[in-house]
Amino acid sequence: MPQALLKGNVAFAEAAIRAGCQAYFGYPITPQTELLEHMSSRMLELGRTFLQAESEVAAINMVYGAAAAGVRVMTSSSSPGISLMQEGFSYIAGSEVPAVIIDVMRGGPGLGNIQPSQADYNQVTKSAGHGDFHPIVLAPATVQEAIDMTVLAFDLAEKYRTLVFVVADGAIGQMMEPATLPPMRSLPSERPAWALTGAEGRERNVVNSLYLGADSLELLNRRLQSKLAEIETNEVRSDALHTDDADLVFVAFGTAARVARTAMQTLRRDGLRVGLFRPITLWPFPAEQLARIAGRTRAFLVVEMNAGQMVHDVRATVGATFPVRFYGRMGGAIPMPEEIEREARLLHDELMTPEDELRSKSPNGHSGS
Amino acid sequence: MPQALLKGNVAFAEAAIRAGCQAYFGYPITPQTELLEHMSSRMLELGRTFLQAESEVAAINMVYGAAAAGVRVMTSSSSPGISLMQEGFSYIAGSEVPAVIIDVMRGGPGLGNIQPSQADYNQVTKSAGHGDFHPIVLAPATVQEAIDMTVLAFDLAEKYRTLVFVVADGAIGQMMEPATLPPMRSLPSERPAWALTGAEGRERNVVNSLYLGADSLELLNRRLQSKLAEIETNEVRSDALHTDDADLVFVAFGTAARVARTAMQTLRRDGLRVGLFRPITLWPFPAEQLARIAGRTRAFLVVEMNAGQMVHDVRATVGATFPVRFYGRMGGAIPMPEEIEREARLLHDELMTPEDELRSKSPNGHSGS
Amino acid sequence: MDTVEVEYNPECEQLVYARPAALTPVHTHYCPGCTHGTAHHLVAEVIDELGIRDRSILVASVGCSVFAYNYFDVDACEAAHGRAPAMATGIKRVNPENVVFTYQGDGDLASIGAAEILHAAARGEQITVIFINNAIYGMTGGQMAPTSLIGQKTTSSPFGRDAALAGQPIRMAEILAALPGTAYSVRRSLHDARHVIQAKKAIKTGFEAQLKGLGFAVVELLSSCPTNWGMTPSESLTWIEEKMMPTYPLGDYRVAEELKTRRRRRAR
Amino acid sequence: MDTVEVEYNPECEQLVYARPAALTPVHTHYCPGCTHGTAHHLVAEVIDELGIRDRSILVASVGCSVFAYNYFDVDACEAAHGRAPAMATGIKRVNPENVVFTYQGDGDLASIGAAEILHAAARGEQITVIFINNAIYGMTGGQMAPTSLIGQKTTSSPFGRDAALAGQPIRMAEILAALPGTAYSVRRSLHDARHVIQAKKAIKTGFEAQLKGLGFAVVELLSSCPTNWGMTPSESLTWIEEKMMPTYPLGDYRVAEELKTRRRRRAR
Amino acid sequence: MESSIIIAGFGGQGVLFAGQLLAYAGMDIGRHVTWIPSYGPEMRGGTANCTVIISDEPIGAPIVSRPSIAVALNQPSFEKYEPLVQEGGLLVVNSSIVSLTSERDDIEVICIPATTIAERAGSTKMLNMAAVGALLARRPVLPLKAIDEALQAHLPESKAHLLESNLTVLRQGYEMAETATVA
Amino acid sequence: MESSIIIAGFGGQGVLFAGQLLAYAGMDIGRHVTWIPSYGPEMRGGTANCTVIISDEPIGAPIVSRPSIAVALNQPSFEKYEPLVQEGGLLVVNSSIVSLTSERDDIEVICIPATTIAERAGSTKMLNMAAVGALLARRPVLPLKAIDEALQAHLPESKAHLLESNLTVLRQGYEMAETATVA
Amino acid sequence: MAKGRVVIDVERCKGCELCREACPPDILALAEQLNSKGYRPVILMDPSHDCTGCALCATVCPDSCITVFRFRTENRGAAHATGVA
Amino acid sequence: MAKGRVVIDVERCKGCELCREACPPDILALAEQLNSKGYRPVILMDPSHDCTGCALCATVCPDSCITVFRFRTENRGAAHATGVA
Ligand SMILES: Cc1ncc(C[n+]2csc(CCOP(=O)(O)OP(=O)(O)O)c2C)c(N)n1
Ligand SMILES: Cc1ncc(C[n+]2csc(CCOP(=O)(O)OP(=O)(O)O)c2C)c(N)n1
Ligand code: SF4
Ligand code: SF4
Ligand code: SF4
Ligand code: SF4
């Protein structure tokens, strides 16, 4: 396939279609609306299912239904809409049906605004709903990755019968970049054995998350936990750039990682040995990979478009003794390379001062300009 | 006031009334329904506002409205209902209006069951909705504490103009214990200056969470973050029992803490030096207090009625090197004292083995029987 | 659980009524005399008679009927509270060949699920909705429903439902009949044998509407909750007739032409 | 922002029309010719005429009117998408003396907020709802609304709204009129001066219903969206008249007796 | 001293109230008490049970895996709890409808025809009082007097007229158990 | 080599398309490109802008605080971006409606009556092409030919009939800027 | 002479007695002893053979415990009159 | 002789021209130059003094840019006819 200049939101949608998405249910919300709009024409052209739901609550429960019927199904939304889907996510997790969710985050809390944000990191990685579960969370940083990870999302969802999120900040949804789309996959000829299709010639199937007895519900939870453990061993993904010789390593994902990359290049030109570690799966978090890098670098500068969320996973990974500094912008602001460079230079200077002093300086909250 | 034998759910409700709760909006859900039912009679008797909403989504937005009008308002629900309120929580946080939420958790995910659970620890402490905010989260372990913390919740909500959660597992909502209710407070004679009451003789007030520009929304977020920082310094609460001489300290909250307490007593009778640390504010998490104890004990056994959620905050606090073991039951199961004793004895024996060996044994996930 | 094998000699005996095949042998958890059970066997009989057991998909809802997926011998799922119509939409849209039906209580359908049922009807989703109106929240212990009667004492309206505070009862069969996608919307009652038989006819038509692809179909059934009404089963049936029916008149609020003509022809 | 001070001599000139006091001087963000603005000044004029500016509380909704709280000079808040009626309920229940009104678009009120508006009407909440029906989602760039017309091309119905897939347009004024707590439910249009004047009368009655404590009041206004309809402002007004009005007949669908008589008396 | 008591039976047998009565009485004489029910969706015919703990110290776990005393008012409850009673513990059985007998020799089992006693006194609904009486006869966790007073104080108004007969049943259960030969 | 270009103006001035055109052209000749718009709720009269980056290496940040090139099609855009252009950078100004002039001597400012040029060629809507032409005349970030081809390839069908006039406007803008004396 | 008979699944029966009230000849009664669920089930008490096999009991039974037969010897036609076919 | 006049807040005007169409004597026109928002505002062009002060323009103006006066000298009564009072 030749390269095309694609908008992130359109790329998500077209990639899903090529990955064999058979049904889409969604509700408009900026900054992901172009995704729904693309689906509204392409899915119908292809004779697949597209429906604009009356709300996000309805959308996720339609997704739940289609997933229970065993088709490849997806929805997409942005922060407030994702909040409304929490109950549905929990039901889908409890019923172990596969579904793909695209979350193009915007500034919060509340109505907030529609500018790019990463303030829902905790929401997708720590608690996408009530009860003990984690969706797999993929975080693309380019339009090409948006495509590749959407395809991956469908495969992982099916493999583990789980929820898979692809999360992007509004900038990735809105920007255009050259990217290559995969060929169109043929749709599966039959449904999974557990799917609801009518009990003709077989035992009836039930899709359900209700287990009245504590013992039976605990059994379900054990199964879910071992599935999560399996995912934690098999599906961790991350990307590292110039981390081998680095004194200082940026840790960032999505657009923040792109900006950090630019800052890194500038700083390297100035002779500072800076690297970049980019979690690609936000859950499972690439803790081992990060820990290994901590072994050979002197400090981390975590850059996020929020008040400091992933930084807690970084600190939990490397412990309170390892220098971890945070720089964040909130409310839809995107950090500029210059800001990151400034923070990096400050930190780099401190690296020359005794460890303990440094540690004391490492603030807990965000230190954003 | 003399002692009365009170059911947790009734205690929450009556305590709220005595604390001056002027309006309650809620939707029935087990295991908190008695709370709503108590409100349905008492609030009307007192000429205050009670309304059974059409859903949890409506309930939280009614709460948002009444809070914007400057009255003391509360809702209550359980896990699935709390998930549905996430968008509303985020709006309330973004608008900085005070509100009290009682969350009587049940087994999940999905419809799960109605048995006692602590599986929504992450939901309330890490992400009660989209965007960067944390409610204050109080976790009573007795009916008396349910009363005292509900009163405290209203005061903190007003003081910081924030959301305050009081979270209990179903057991605390359902059990009866002797407890003393506070005297009836008189209702505030006037509304706060920022409240919506009609702009007669003053500048008009606006309650809102929309800030179209990234800069203005970032300003709001800075204010929210400094408020959270203030809360983190002022409002941390915890309880420690026999932790001074303990080789092993249980870390648990709510019903799990009660069971751990029984196990502790048995073990102490058998000569094992065991203590109990009980976070009372789940957010802000009592990290310093816990760290101090880590200084004088040899290991923590975290007991939760979930797959292991608070344990991550414990590990983040004491670092990967300090021995932290987890024991959890899921799906509405309550751990029995015997189970905890068994785990404790195992761990205690290991404590006699070299540190490093021990560490390697410390599993990440849950190790529940 | 077991079923009793009933022996008989076809030579000299004719089987007039037997437990429908579309019901599993499981013993229900319903309270004694609760007409949820009656609605269940009517739906099962209709499924048997239409021969659609192996094409049907049940979307159970959250309410006392939460375990319906254990009682109907068809593919089934359990929706979130109030969202059965959305879940059914998701299933029917990708499985147009299946017969998809929801079974919902009044709290589920009329309260928390109002938007989903309204829009399923507006879109004319090809699903059949069995709507059990027992004027109360049964599962959670007898709180007020949007369908509770004025003055009705419930655990959340201890002084009786006051219209000034809680509004008037909602008549869903009428409201849903007014939506453009609705092919069939009627109200029936389960309070005596004659009405049970009429209810069954309506349920059958509700399924036929879907089989003919005419649009959204809903059958509202006045049903009892002896436990939370605090009455004996038979007192409950009297209460339905004397107290509920005046507020909820039985009748046909929307019947697509295709369904009318068909019924007439059969009558001949 | 500023207002122009218009000088005139009361001796020889009579002021016939001036910008209502209940509007702030802020310049709106609405597109040129968008009749959201028209609805705004009508509501403001009514507030001025009823002298309730300092008692009123606006509950703005999520839609193009999201900034309404900047434009009306009254206490105001911004509700979550679709939840304005719930938020208004929360306010009115604790502030019975205030005049509480919501201002909602059709996506907000008829789609995501269907349950909240339905139940506010069923409960007879003492609030006034200004409902802007422009047959589209304006704010998000022109997607289909439940109110979009059959065949209408939108960014989410690129081949035109197909009733078989998306159902028929919903008529909210009629549906809400059928709910027990509704005291006033009418539909008006903003497409020309005469209709604008009629719309204002209806808005006034909608507020009077609340002032008299008669129950829930809603005024549905057919409004334009030149930008997303892809028309000039004046073409848009024609489209309202020629295309929208046949689907959305103007009329009074519920008018409480107390309001009728009052109107008649005034007419005399 | 801490006693843990599980009372179990059919939904309609007043299981929960019997437990509350013990808790009230315990509280009124200044002991620490907890009461916790099994709870679930409304269902008749389901078996209900509650756990009461009466102690001299603050109570930790409100539930126990092995109670010191169990009251089985119906067959399923007997089957479930008979094996769980602690060594040296007490099992009170409603022999009116429980036909099974215990094989255990490490616990005390006391069988009384609770239903019949109650029926004779006017209503089978009072069978729970007979059981409570029997319990106290064999294990004086609380003085009978305390129960009397608690009953007077906490019997729901609707049942006030039944106070006397309840007290009678309580006593009869007590006396019958005092004299009964232990199984 | 990396150029960062911000194009800004009123909603109706084709700001976004002008940016996309540069991105398409860049991509078609094998450069790395990113295009990102300012986005917001539908509003006319608001100012729209987009950032285009054209580079030889993979692109990090898709946005810049200080562009190497800015195109100001209206007054507000001039006020906002004139101060931000990098030293030695270029500022293209639509002199038809922008009356202000730049005080800066460390950047190149080129003023062309874009609206007027477009109007003469048939429609003011094409003013964005005149500006793009002028841009390329002063900073050959891309060969004019590449833009020609991109325009032919990506002009929306609805506008196909305007291709020629668009090309003309593009050229006129280019030529006028080539010859223009720099402010 | 009885025209029909009913068989009741006593383990399934919850003793709600709705069938009793529906039964025209009133030939259903509560059994003495409880079933394993603790309910007093209904049983057929038809000494004078009055059961017509009208199946009204089965129609109203919420728990579908009742199977109904009609003897072929006389008035076959009645089968269609039941309305529950 | 003109019976009235209108004053237009040209900075607020977005040039939608709805007032023009509503204006019976058609005496509103678009100005030549743009306002600071980039819109061509409407202005009063009433050479032959045809404005009646009917206020229809103000009634339909979505942005409430128009203030309307009627001269007291003649037909006061008309004021009440406008219906927008
Ligand atoms: C989101 C959510 N809210 C509330 C509940 C609790 N709940 C379970 S069933 C029910 C209402 C049941 O009433 P109805 O729908 O009338 O059915 P019935 O039990 O009367 O048959 C409620 C509120 C829930 N499970 N989930
Ligand atoms: C929960 C949630 N979902 C979706 C959105 C995005 N959104 C904003 S406005 C809107 C619809 C606006 O349409 P309408 O209500 O008809 O008002 P209009 O803009 O047409 O005046 C949507 C879907 C949101 N802000 N919040
Ligand atoms: S609670 Fe009511 S509705 Fe539920 S099963 Fe019992 S009787 Fe039926
Ligand atoms: S987008 Fe449509 S509704 Fe929104 S302001 Fe513009 S014209 Fe009005
Ligand atoms: S109706 Fe059914 S459940 Fe009720 S008593 Fe008769 S047989 Fe038993
Ligand atoms: S109607 Fe108002 S905004 Fe429109 S042109 Fe006339 S004066 Fe200007």
Image: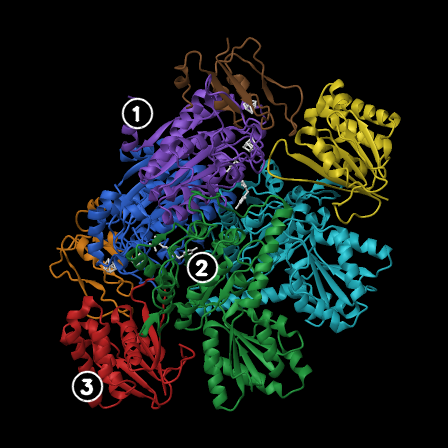
Chain colours: A cyan, B green, C blue, D purple, E red, F yellow, G orange, H brown
Give me the residue at 33% from left, 52% from top.
Answer: C40
- Tell me where residue D15 appears, x and y as whole percent: 46, 22
Q: Quadrant of residue D49?
A: top left
- Amino acid carrying label 3: it is Met
How far apart are the two marked residues, 1 and 2, measured between alpha carbons? 48 Å
Q: Is residue E95 visible?
A: no
- Amino acid carrying label 2: it is Val
Whether ligand 1 has any atom under 8 Å from the Cβ at mark 2 is answered as no
Point out the residue furthest to the left here. Answer: G48
- The numbered mark at residue D266 is 1
User: Which of E83/B366 is in front?
Assistant: B366
- Tell me where residue F128 appears, x and y as whole percent: 75, 29
Q: Quadrant of residue E163?
A: bottom left
User: Which of A116/D212 is in front?
Assistant: D212
**Side (left or right) of C155 relative to A208:** left
Give the residue number, with chain letter if any, for mark 2. Answer: B100
**Marks 1 & 2 on one chain:** no
Looking at the picture, does residue D124 appear above or below residue C29?
above
- Does the residue at mark 1 contact the one at mark 2 (Cβ under 8 Å)? no
- Amino acid carrying label 1: it is Arg
Q: Chain of mark 3?
A: E
Mark 1 burial class by Cα count in 10 Å: few <14, some 14-19, many 20+ = few
**Marks 1 & 3 on one chain:** no
For label 2, the SS is: strand
Whether ligand 6 has any atom under 8 Å from the Cβ at mark 1 is answered as no
Mark 3 burial class by Cα count in 10 Å: few <14, some 14-19, many 20+ = some
Looking at the picture, does residue F180 appear above or below residue A340?
above
For label 3, the SS is: helix
Q: Chain of mark 1?
A: D
Give the residue number, with chain letter if any, for mark 3. Answer: E176
* The N terminus of chain C: image quadrant: bottom left
